[in-house]
Image (tube, rainbow, N blue to C red):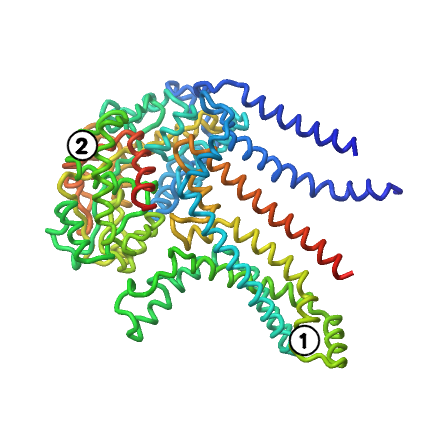
């Protein structure tokens, strides 16, 4: 018996020691990558033969086809194999890297690249997970307006050369034009008034869902007259009165939502399914370009249209982040560089109407002309309409706070 | 090899125990440490029981206890009653019995995820039942059909668990209803016991240990499973495992200890259920001797 006790104790001691050993090391800034992006020749040489594990949201079939088709083929010309790791939530990839860091794995990590922005980027910054200093050195960074506010900041967090641009997302309202008239989609107020006359036919996914969180901010902007009063880092004095007004407005409208507001869909996926079955007639999206594809596939009715409400639409940029412990750092940089190619951005726009993360003023004129020549589905708003009154995102401090308080003040009420 | 018996048992158990200790044990130790504030990737982390206090004050967690208890207990009781009834019915089938038992076992192979999706297609407001109701003019629109999925009570979640676990209990009960049971029932009949008396004093007591063991498994599983309540339930109130995952996926790493605290509570509850079961079995065994 005593021997057993001894064995158990020594096992516990070993476990504790290893746990404390990991705890003893001070969290430090991410180590600089062993790969020097300014020497692009050596990056290409190192990347050759590597397989890059790219963790990205995998719920979009059209995008998956583009990634495993066009992007994978482009990477093959550099001798790089693409392994797309489909995830439902970017937080999963961040958690994987975090787990490795906790286990003391500073090299040879399983995640090479992550499609990321906003709070998840901020979480990575908080825990020092990112490899930095490479995006501005990519050869194709010349097509990016690195000084533009939407590129230099990610939901208010300075990017500081720790992630490379990929896409631009402009939100829009998607609706069935047989159910809603132009006047109904003119503003947030007219939309909510329509919902009051047609209870049960509008909803949004429960924040912290990425899109649901945007819908709440869209209504917030409308309530306080735009994002200006909430610009910059989180400020309790600016937030509190704005939030109070927002919650009372959302709670007043709740009874007119799907299921009379007693619950909310858990994901944007579920919301789009409700729209495709006709259970709801309008929803907000971050991907208005993909709607044309859904109409063409007859998943959505042909009478589907899009609108930008008065006060504008929230827009943001999404990026490619590379964890500091990535096993295939060089291949990840090649991936980020391929994604910035004007031809890749054009293909993506063609495939699913995703708006370019690069600055079209910096690409060759013939590519610019090709962008303009891409046919747009009658269901989809043209790029000029979507970008004309685009509104910035709030700092991630506001975003997380809004998500938490929405849960307490709307969902749990 | 002439090893002492206890050493031989220990050696034979070692591989399985090592796996359990390493993956489950280490996971629980990690979760417990993180629930107490162990976050070496954050500057200024410190040991504290704040997460457990936060958990107690979190309305999402509080609402979750009632829902989790309701869903797991109702599912277990319904599955146990229906499973035993099904087994007793199948036993009377005679020839078709083997065929029916095989059918039951195909249900066991269906993953819960598939079961949940089937429930969604069957019970959802645009599901099969709703469309049938609309077809015969009982409802005018999908929204008129009662919300059985994403409902506050957990109807669809319970329905999925009962659908999936009833055959499990039935298979367990069929196994216990062997030849010996039939002989004892026959003896009771010869001694003048009426059908109900045979059931009450012979069949059910013989079935009890096996069905109880199966029910404990069902209870522990339904209280700790994640995918079914996520697909068929609400974001609030949600069952404990869903709440744990919501907190785990919170982009603010400050919520991580609370997520781990919920996980520790789930593990403790499961262990308590198993401990209660072991005690009960010991009592039953003493009584039957």
Q: Residues within 10 Å of mark 1 (few under 14, many from 20)?
A: some
Dot 1 and dot 2 residues touching (CB under 8 Å): no
What label sits on residue B81 in the rendered view? Answer: none
> In the rendered image, is residue A207 in sight?
yes
Chain ID of residue with mark 1:
B
- Residue drawn at x 45%, y 38% is B55
Tell me: A68 left or right of B286.
Answer: left
Chain ID of residue with mark 2:
A
What label sits on residue A365 in the rendered view? Answer: 2
Where A127 falls versus B191 (above or below)?
above
- Residue drawn at x 40%, y 49% is B237
Which one is in front, A250 or A119?
Answer: A250
Q: Residues within 10 Å of mark 2 (few under 14, many from 20)?
A: few
Q: Which residue is at the far left?
A: A183
**Which residue matches tag 1?**
B197
Which one is in front, B45 or A389?
Answer: B45
Q: Quadrant of residue B135?
A: bottom left
């Amino acid at each position: 018996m005593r021997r057993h006790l001894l064995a158990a104790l020594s096992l516990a001691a070993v476990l504790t020691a290893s746990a404390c050993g990991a705890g003893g090391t001070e969290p430090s800034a991410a180590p600089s990558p062993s790969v020097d992006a300014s020497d692009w020749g050596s990056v290409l040489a190192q990347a050759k033969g590597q397989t890059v594990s790219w963790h990205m949201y995998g719920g979009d079939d059209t995008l998956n086809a583009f990634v495993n088709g066009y992007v994978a083929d482009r990477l093959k010309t550099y001798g790089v194999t693409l392994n797309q790791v489909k995830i439902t939530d970017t937080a999963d990839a961040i958690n994987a890297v975090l787990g490795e860091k906790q286990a003391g794995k500073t090299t040879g990590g399983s995640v090479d690249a992550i499609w990321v922005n906003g709070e998840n980027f901020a979480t990575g910054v908080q825990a020092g997970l990112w490899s930095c200093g490479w995006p501005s050195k990519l050869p194709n960074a010349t097509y990016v307006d690195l000084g533009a506010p939407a590129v230099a900041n990610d939901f208010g967090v300075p990017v500081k050369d720790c992630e490379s641009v990929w896409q631009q997302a402009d939100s829009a309202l998607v609706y069935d034009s047989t159910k809603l008239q132009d006047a109904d989609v003119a503003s947030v107020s007219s939309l909510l008034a329509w919902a009051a006359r047609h209870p049960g036919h509008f909803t949004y996914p429960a924040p912290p869902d990425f899109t649901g969180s945007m819908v709440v901010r869209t209504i917030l902007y409308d309530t306080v007259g735009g994002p200006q009063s909430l610009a910059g880092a989180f400020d309790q004095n600016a937030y509190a009165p704005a939030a109070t007004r927002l919650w009372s407005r959302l709670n007043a409208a709740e009874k007119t939502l799907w299921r009379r507001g007693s619950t909310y869909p858990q994901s944007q996926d579920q919301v789009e399914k409700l729209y495709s079955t006709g259970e709801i007639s309008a929803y907000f999206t971050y991907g208005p370009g993909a709607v044309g594809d859904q109409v063409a596939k007859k998943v959505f009715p042909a009478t589907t249209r899009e609108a930008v409400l008065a006060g504008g639409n929230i827009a943001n940029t999404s990026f490619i982040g590379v964890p500091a412990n990535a096993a295939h750092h060089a291949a990840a940089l090649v991936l980020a560089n391929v994604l910035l190619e004007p031809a890749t951005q054009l293909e993506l726009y063609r495939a699913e109407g995703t708006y370019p993360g690069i600055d079209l003023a910096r690409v060759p004129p013939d590519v610019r002309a090709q962008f303009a020549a891409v046919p747009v589905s009658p269901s989809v708003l043209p790029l000029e309409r979507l970008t004309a009154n685009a509104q910035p995102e709030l700092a991630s401090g506001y975003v997380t706070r809004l998500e938490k308080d929405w849960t307490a003040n709307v969902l749990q009420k | 090899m002439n090893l002492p018996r206890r050493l031989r048992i220990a050696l034979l158990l070692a591989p399985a125990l090592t796996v359990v200790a390493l993956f489950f044990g280490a996971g629980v130790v990690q979760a417990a440490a993180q629930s107490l504030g162990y976050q070496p990737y954050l500057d200024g982390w410190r040991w504290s029981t704040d997460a457990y206090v936060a958990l107690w004050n979190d309305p999402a967690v509080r609402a979750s206890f009632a829902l989790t208890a309701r869903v797991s207990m109702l599912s277990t009781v319904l599955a146990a009653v229906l499973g035993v009834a099904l087994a007793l019915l199948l036993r009377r089938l005679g020839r078709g019995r083997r065929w029916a038992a095989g059918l039951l076992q195909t249900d066991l192979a269906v993953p819960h995820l598939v079961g949940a999706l089937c429930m969604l297609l069957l019970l959802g407001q645009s599901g099969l039942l709703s469309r049938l109701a609309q077809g015969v003019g009982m409802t005018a629109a999908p929204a008129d059909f009662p919300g059985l999925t994403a409902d506050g009570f957990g109807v669809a979640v319970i329905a999925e668990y009962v659908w999936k676990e009833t055959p499990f209990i039935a298979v367990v009960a069929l196994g216990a209803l062997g030849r010996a049971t039939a002989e004892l029932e026959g003896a009771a009949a010869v001694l003048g016991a009426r059908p109900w008396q045979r059931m009450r004093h012979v069949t059910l007591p013989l079935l009890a240990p096996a069905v109880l063991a199966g029910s404990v498994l069902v209870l522990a599983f339904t209280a700790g499973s994640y995918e079914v309540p996520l697909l068929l339930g609400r974001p609030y109130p949600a069952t404990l495992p869903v709440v744990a995952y919501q907190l785990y996926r919170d982009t603010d790493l400050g919520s991580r200890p609370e997520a781990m605290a919920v996980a520790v509570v789930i593990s403790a509850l499961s262990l308590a259920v198993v401990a209660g079961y072991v005690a009960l079995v010991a009592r039953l065994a003493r009584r039957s001797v």
